[in-house]
Image (cartoon, helix red, strand yellow):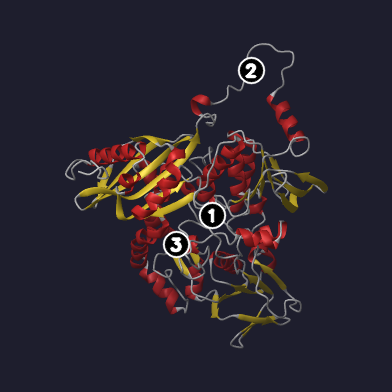
Amino acid sequence: MTDTEPRTATLDAPAHARAEAWLADFEEALTAHDIDRASAMFAPTSFWRDVIAFSWNLLTVEDPDGVRDLLAATLASTAPAGLTLTEPPTEDGGVVTAWFTFETAVGRGTGVLRLIEVDGRDRAWTFLTTLHELKGHEEPRGTRRPKGAEHGSSKNRSTWMERRRSESVSLGRTTQPYVLVIGGGQGGIALGARLRQLGVPSLVIDKHPRPGDQWRRRYKSLCLHDPVWYDHLPYLKFPDTWPVFAPKDKIGDWLESYVSVMEVPYWSNAEATRATWSEETGEWTVEVDKDGEAVVLRPTHLVFATGMSGKARVPEVEGLDVFRGDVHHSSDHPGPDAYRGKRAVVIGSNNSAFDICGALWENDADVTMVQRSSTHIVRSESLMEYGLGDLYSERALAAGVTTEKADLVFASLPYRILHEFQIPIYEKMAQVDKDFYDRLERAGFWLDWGDDDSGLFMKYLRRGSGYYIDVGAADLVASGDVRLVHGQVTRLTEDAVVLDDGVELPADVVVFATGYSSMNGWVADLVDPETAARLGKCWGLGSGTTKDPGPWEGELRNMWKPTAVDNLWMHGGNLHQSRHYSLYLALQLKARFEGIKTPVHRLAPVHHTE
């Protein structure tokens, strides 16, 4: 045996012994700074996904050469130790899966290891390392929770309410936030709650009158398409009686109560109008219109938490100014009430388009859907059963899969191979729901399953569009109750939509359910176009599939990690991502606030500007 060969357990040993031996050998190699030996413990095709523990980045490296590069750059400063199994490993199909904890020089982490046999030895196939707390800066939870009451006697005592009022009055005026979060939806308040528990002075601002208005102002039929187990916020889970699919106004009220209960520093009626960065002072200057008052904030870090999408995308078509009816983007759709008995044309065939078509039809509007390109559709029941059930469901909870564990299971699957796990799931759905899909195709609907048949979640990650989770409106298209036409809109007349083949669709209301641009569009508006270009496009993996141009990035572009623009961060996604990744963004900001060194390994280059 050479110095670079691991001393793993025999392959006929139990999974526990094999995983324990691999972790012990790996730790020994790391402690000895034997990078060649450590990298040789990974399979020829393998993936190490690190979430800020080693790299202070969200980064996936591939194969032994990628491991060697990561360790060469980070091992000395990270000083990993204490790799310890936390539960009995499992084995399935020749893959051993093991959960472990570890420590670094500055924090504590959790990891997931998958072992496979290569040339008679156990090698790592996938390896996840995540940092979940900083030493000396742990959250005040559990045994560390605050006492609350101040026992004894004091003439200078101040109550909780008095302290909260004093903080509210001074924040943004006599005291400045270290972090300013623009956007007070689920992403912004999840991050705000994390930062508060970590003791980072922060402020979340939003232009709406009340927290939760981001949801309340949407069309009245809107409900979450993701189930409750997938949608919890940090610290405060939905109660057991919460509906599986929450209506928008119920979510709005929950977000408002969350801000109050979690004491998130939050300004309503506060719209950022201008932001500039000073290299000299190392801070941002952000001009804010707060209830009609001009306020200047000077945070060190600026976070855009404006969702995974940018500004609404409305095609530039002739005749918008001559159309006599109502025309708007789906994000501004008020609901169906005003359009009873009217002729409605909805441009688009994804989630919002279907939801709006369904609600209009229920309100006795005459509805036409214009499909411009193919759409991936999955039935909600099938997605729940086959796509999410093993991780986010009552079934999962009964099997011991908590929300936190499910998040890490999902995070442990590298994006490079995630589609391989998704394809069989959607093949099953296609089989189970064959009659459903046959009806849609007979109606002329253009269906797809993604460029590589990997389905909804890969479309979401790659492009954030092109899909519909069916909650009933697809049947209206299949039956012809909602008329379906194909084509591109070329112009509007006074009372019709004209398509590229010359077909005219009479209309009293036109809804453009045409999606959104990249999040860096908000940066262009608030800072300047040059900064937005330096930041680059947000979202997408570089897969080379439709609307996700290469080169391969390995992680979502610019999300929850350092960007090419100093002290500028992007935070967005669905409720699941807002919950899970807010922890890692908050820890990165906390480390900087405390002066902990955060050398970023392999800052992602910018390949696309919009």
For the point 68% across and 76% down, the residue is: 316
Residue type at tag 2: Glu
Label 3 sits on a secondary structure element that is helix
Mark 2 and mark 1 lie on one chain; the one further toward the N terminus is: 2
Q: Quadrant of the N terminus?
A: top left
Residue type at tag 1: Leu
Q: Outermost residue, top direction?
A: 153
In the rendered image, which residue does mark 3 sit on? 458
- Of the residues tagged 2 and 1, which is closer to the observer? 2
Q: Quadrant of the C terminus?
A: bottom right
Mark identifier at residue 150: 2
Mark 3 and mark 1 lie on one chain; the one further toward the N terminus is: 1
Residue type at tag 3: Met
- Of the residues tagged 3 and 1, which is closer to the observer? 3
Circles 3 and 2: CB atoms closer than 8 Å: no
* In front of the other: 120 or 16: 120
In the rendered image, which residue does mark 1 sit on? 224
Q: Position of residue 58 (x, y in %)?
A: 49, 50
